[in-house]
């Protein structure tokens, strides 16, 4: 996430945290964490809440195996969709 761009009440950190939590739950896996984007990242140019996801590492044999499974890919996609739905529901309540 871009830590210098901020929207009161909801911004990059909240988006990154929500997506990370939902994908972790859907994939029944663990998260490596939420980190600010490095300087010069494309996220520095975006003026709406945005986050970059790393859904696994191909260099890790177990993650490589999982990432090749369609069922695992589906769970990751569902986690992302669940996060967006959750964010929209919370914003509608305000």
Image (cartoon, rainbow, N blue to C red):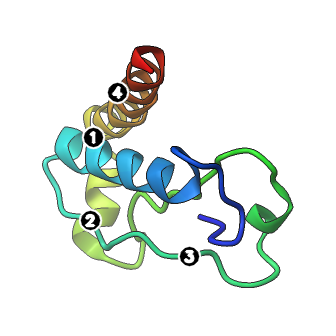
Q: Name the residue under label 3.
A: 36
Report whether 28 appears left or right of 78: left
Give the Cα separation between the discs numbered 2 and 4: 16 Å
Which image quarter holds the N terminus?
bottom right
Of badges 1 and 2, the one in the foreground is 2
Location of mark 4 (residue): 82
Q: Which of marks 3 and 2 is in front?
A: 3
Residue positioned most to the right = 45
Specify few, some or many for label 2: CA neighbours under 10 Å numbering under 14, 14-19, or 20 or more: some
Q: Position of residue 4 (x, y in %)?
A: 70, 71
To which residue does mark 2 refer? Answer: 31
Mark 3 or mark 2, which has the lower sequence index? 2
Using a 10 Å C-alpha cutoff, classify the residue at mark 3 as few (fewer than 14 neighbours), some (14 to 19) or many (20 or more).
some
Q: Residue at x 40, y 46 (%)?
A: 19
Tag 3 near tag 2, CB within 8 Å: no
Question: Could you tell me which residue is drawn at 75 percent across and 84 percent down?
Answer: 39
Rendered position, 64 above or below 68? below
Using the image, tell me which numbered label, if any, was put on residue 72: 1
């Amino acid at each position: 996430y871009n830590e210098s761009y901020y929207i009161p009440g909801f911004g990059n950190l909240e988006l990154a945290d929500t997506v990370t939590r939902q994908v972790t739950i859907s994939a029944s896996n663990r998260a490596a964490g939420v980190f600010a984007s490095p300087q010069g990242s494309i996220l520095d140019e975006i003026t709406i809440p945005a986050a970059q996801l790393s859904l696994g590492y191909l260099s890790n044999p177990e993650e490589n195996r999982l990432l090749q499974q369609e069922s695992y890919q589906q769970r990751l996609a569902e986690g992302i969709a669940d996060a967006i739905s959750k964010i929209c529901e919370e914003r509608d309540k305000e």
